[in-house]
């Protein structure tokens, strides 16, 4: 078998040596455009886990790599004159030059031929080097892979060029921990990511957002000027040590990160590997790991005796999933660093915690495992903001109270609004009493009702609950009274109007279809239907708008009588008020259409009218779709304006959902997938938020709350399968101050004993 590898970086070299080791009869040539001792960058980091993968693949190189390592356990975060240390991170650094040297030597010893200072941008030039009858060409030529570009039609690369700037420098400062420095000055915010990788040298990557970069004049400085300015910026920590520039960075001191993805990783006999196939932002230090793990998988598949196309397909299958997972984590991390301005004014404790959990892969309990002292400190700090807890009794963040106006919730867990489609003529019945009552007994701090509709035509289906008759009022009062009498939970009424998404069958009877009888004419901002199976809405005129506004106010008044603690206006998911906000369904040409300010006008008018009657000591929230997930629709940038508009009208908290406004939407699902939208609104617009969407366990709730990504976490589907979600979470976390219904105390004892036994048998 004849193989050419274009690119002598970690991916190309490691693949070559592993394949040669597995199939010594294979002829393998690595072609590298640079000299073998010349490379960009300074050090790379590997986690302990990655090293185990390397050990399994080739113990010889692994031994050499580990014997060249600088190890550390601590992460030090320097911000606003404080340094906060968290331990247990288990990473090691090695000079990139040393790593390449180890791989080059091992490859050469195994019989791989290395051809340096040879550039190949077109595989058709390989025969000129005497490389003919090739069975496989490995494009290991890095992020700007010329081979990938040449075959773009097949690989279908997706390149996302980011705007933050970074420069990869070195220094003689001997870091003892992985260190982050943050500087906030008149120009903006600048950070350095630093770690030692050998006796004398450390990596020192400086990064900032584009605005800070321009304000500081970095766009006008050459390399020498840039290095001098960076030295000045971080002088207070460098103790006179110099920053060192890499010779290969001369042409342009600063870079921007490009996120690379490809639809396909192979085409005929050409296969992509490493940065040519994918990149992950350097802040999770995984580029080299991914490149080398690709090499392990590709070498294994190619060495197997199956036909090459099958081997390449197996390689792609295995690696693409793993890479996507890491790229998701890397995206969260990258976005955190791109938006440090958003977090920099947090208390150093919260700032550091937010930094450590930024990728959403390191969780609250994971931090406890790594460093219980550090996490205990975070919990004490967080709890102290909400009350007096004599040590060591600080509750986990999710069990701290939260106050809005005159309402104090006992914890941060919310039962999200969920339509049960089980009302009769709008009246909630025994099902609702048992359903909501059980969830109140289950320990959540706040229960939000399903969307309760303000008129018969405001319902989605005939099964939707309403608040437009005295009968509804009485039925709701029964539920509210039960919640208040039997639990510590508070209960919030969500009011809404289905608009053009109304007049459908029950979900279990074909929810997106119009009913065969008893349907009604639907209304909306414009005559744009939500889905082909639903009716075309009648555009609302002034009378319609006034009438519906009055219905919302009347329902709010009934909500006061029923004793609800809080009121939420449903302005999300494409229902009436949401359909005014999104341009996808609002094509009006009057003052209620056009700009976002205009599109917000009617929902805000309705909100104001309700706020005017709703008691001043009771809070109000607004549920919004922070993005439509459709190009041309509402974006997360717009969500700031939307949130601000409702806050200016007297809202106390924004409940941040997304989408469901168009059937064209392409949401990016994943765990906690809507939390970044809450984070942005909370930390950029400085507005309290409720996060919701695929938040499933207590660990996640603690992390979201402690990191300040939201003030409250709402869980919908998890509460459908476990009404006692909060009680279970308290028992699992060993939080003994949790209130349990007295009728259930023997169950509590048994559960706690079982959990103790499980823990001690581990
Ligand atoms: C600032 C920064 C910090 C980083 N920090 C880390 C870290 O801490 N840990 C980590 O794991 N990763 C880190 N990375 C990522 C890491 O550098 C890459 O992910 C890794 O090098 C990918 O390996 P590769 O072999 O695919 O590509 P590369 O290392 O880029 O190697 C590609 C090789 O191909 C050669 N080549 C390119 N074109 C041609 C051509 N036409 N002909 C011949 N040869 C060619 C190049 O000269 C190069 O030697 C960082 C990256 C950056 C930018
Ligand atoms: C059965 C069901 C009914 C729902 N009804 C409503 C509703 O009436 N009002 C609302 O704002 N959201 C409603 N939602 C959306 C949820 O409140 C929540 O935003 C969504 O399910 C994502 O959260 P989860 O991942 O915790 O389930 C409903 C969700 C489900 C599963």
Image (tube, helix red, strand yellow):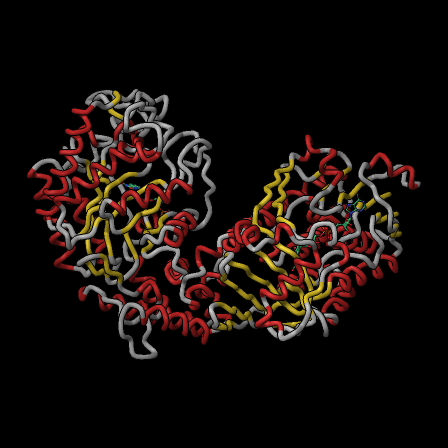
Is residue 585 or residue 751 the one in the foreground?
Answer: 585
The quadrant of the rendered image in which ligand 2 is seen is: top left
Q: Is residue 305 above or below residue 344?
A: above
Q: Residue at x 30, y 65 (%)?
A: 399
Q: How many marks?
A: 0
Is residue 243 or residue 454 the one in the foreground?
Answer: 243
> Can you give x and y, in whole percent of width and height, for residue 456 in the image?
16, 30
Residue at the bottom extreme, as displayed: 391
Residue 704 appears in the rendering = yes
Q: Quadrant of the N terminus?
A: top right
> Can you give x and y, in whole percent of width and height, for residue 81 in the image?
48, 72
Residue 424 appears in the rendering = no
> Can you give x and y, in whole percent of width and height, for residue 165 in the image?
60, 52
Is residue 627 or residue 323 the one in the foreground?
Answer: 627
Q: Residue at x 31, y 47 (%)?
A: 655
- Is 30 on the left or on the right of 466, as rendered? right
Q: Residue at x 66, y 58 (%)?
A: 226
- Is 235 on the left or on the right of 751, as rendered? right
> Can you give x and y, in whole percent of width and height, for residue 329 in the image?
53, 53
- Is 337 on the left or on the right of 110, as rendered? left
Q: Is residue 532 above or below residue 73?
A: above
Q: Quadrant of residue 235?
A: bottom right
């Amino acid at each position: 078998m004849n193989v050419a590898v274009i690119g002598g970086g970690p991916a190309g070299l490691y693949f070559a040596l592993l394949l040669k080791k597995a199939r010594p009869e294979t002829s393998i040539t690595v072609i590298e455009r640079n000299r073998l001792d010349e490379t960009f960058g300074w050090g790379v980091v590997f986690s302990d886990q990655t090293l185990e993968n390397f050990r399994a693949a080739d113990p010889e190189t692994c031994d050499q790599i580990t014997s060249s390592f600088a190890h550390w356990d601590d992460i030090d975060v320097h911000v606003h004159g404080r340094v906060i240390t968290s331990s247990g991170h288990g990473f090691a650094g090695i000079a990139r030059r040393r790593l390449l040297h180890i791989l080059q030597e091992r490859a050469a010893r195994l019989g791989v031929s290395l051809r340096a200072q040879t550039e190949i941008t077109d595989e058709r030039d390989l025969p000129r080097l005497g490389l003919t009858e090739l069975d496989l060409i490995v494009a290991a030529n890095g992020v700007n892979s010329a081979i990938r570009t040449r075959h773009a039609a097949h690989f279908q690369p997706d390149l996302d060029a980011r705007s933050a700037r970074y420069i990869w420098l070195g220094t003689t400062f001997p870091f003892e921990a992985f260190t982050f420095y943050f500087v906030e000055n008149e120009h903006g915010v600048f950070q350095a990511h630093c770690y030692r990788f050998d006796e004398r040298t450390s990596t020192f990557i400086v990064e900032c957002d584009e605005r800070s970069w321009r304000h500081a004049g970095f766009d006008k400085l050459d390399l020498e000027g840039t290095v001098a300015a960076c030295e000045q910026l971080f002088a207070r920590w460098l103790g006179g040590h110099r920053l060192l520039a890499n010779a290969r960075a001369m042409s342009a001191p600063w870079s921007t990160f490009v996120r690379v993805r490809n639809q396909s990783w192979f085409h005929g006999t050409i296969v992509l590997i490493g940065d040519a196939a994918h990149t992950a932002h350097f802040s999770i230090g995984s580029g080299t790991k991914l490149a080398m793990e690709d090499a392990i998988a590709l070498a294994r598949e190619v060495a197997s005796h199956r036909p090459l196309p099958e081997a390449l397909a197996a390689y792609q299958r295995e690696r693409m999933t793993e890479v996507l997972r890491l790229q998701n984590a890397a995206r969260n991390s990258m976005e955190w660093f791109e938006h440090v301005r958003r977090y920099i004014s947090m208390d150093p404790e919260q700032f550091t915690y937010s930094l450590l959990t930024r990728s959403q892969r390191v969780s609250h309990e994971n931090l406890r495992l790594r460093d219980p002292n550090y996490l205990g400190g975070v919990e004490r700090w967080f709890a102290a903001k909400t009350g007096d807890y004599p040590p060591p009794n600080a509750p986990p963040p999710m069990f701290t109270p939260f106050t809005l106006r005159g309402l104090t919730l006992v914890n941060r867990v919310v039962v999200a609004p969920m339509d049960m489609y089980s009302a009769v003529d709008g009246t909630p019945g025994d099902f609702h009493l048992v359903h909501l009552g059980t969830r109140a007994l289950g320990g959540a701090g706040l229960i939000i009702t399903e969307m309760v509709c303000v008129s018969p035509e405001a319902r989605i289906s005939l099964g939707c609950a309403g608040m437009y008759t005295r009968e509804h009022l009485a039925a709701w009062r029964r539920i509210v009274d039960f919640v208040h009498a039997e639990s510590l939970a508070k209960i919030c009424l969500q009011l809404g109007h289905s608009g053009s998404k109304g007049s459908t069958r029950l979900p279990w009877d074909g929810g997106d279809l119009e009913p065969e009888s008893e349907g009604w004419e639907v209304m909306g901002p414009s005559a744009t239907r939500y889905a082909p199976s639903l009716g075309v809405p009648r555009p609302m005129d002034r009378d319609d708008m006034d009438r519906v506004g009055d219905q919302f106010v009347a329902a709010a008044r009934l909500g006061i009588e029923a004793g609800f603690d809080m009121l939420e206006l449903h302005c999300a998911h494409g229902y009436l008020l949401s359909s005014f906000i999104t341009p996808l369904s609002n094509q009006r040409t009057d003052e209620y259409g056009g700009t976002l300010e205009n599109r917000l006008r009617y929902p805000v008018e309705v909100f104001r009218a309700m706020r005017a009657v709703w008691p001043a000591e009771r809070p109000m929230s607004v549920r919004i779709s922070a993005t439509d997930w459709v190009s041309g629709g509402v974006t997360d940038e717009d969500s700031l304006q939307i949130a601000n508009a409702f806050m200016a009208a007297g809202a106390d908290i924004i409940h941040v959902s997304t989408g469901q406004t168009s059937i064209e939407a392409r949401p990016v699902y994943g765990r906690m997938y809507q939390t970044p939208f809450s984070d942005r609104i909370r930390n950029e617009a400085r507005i309290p938020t409720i996060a919701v969407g695929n938040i499933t366990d207590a660990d996640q709730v603690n992390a979201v709350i402690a990191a300040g990504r939201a003030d409250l976490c709402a869980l919908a589907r998890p509460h459908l399968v476990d009404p006692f979600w909060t009680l279970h979470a308290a028992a699992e976390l060993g939080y003994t101050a949790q209130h349990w219904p007295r009728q259930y105390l023997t169950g509590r004892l048994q559960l706690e004993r079982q959990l103790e036994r499980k823990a001690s048998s581990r």
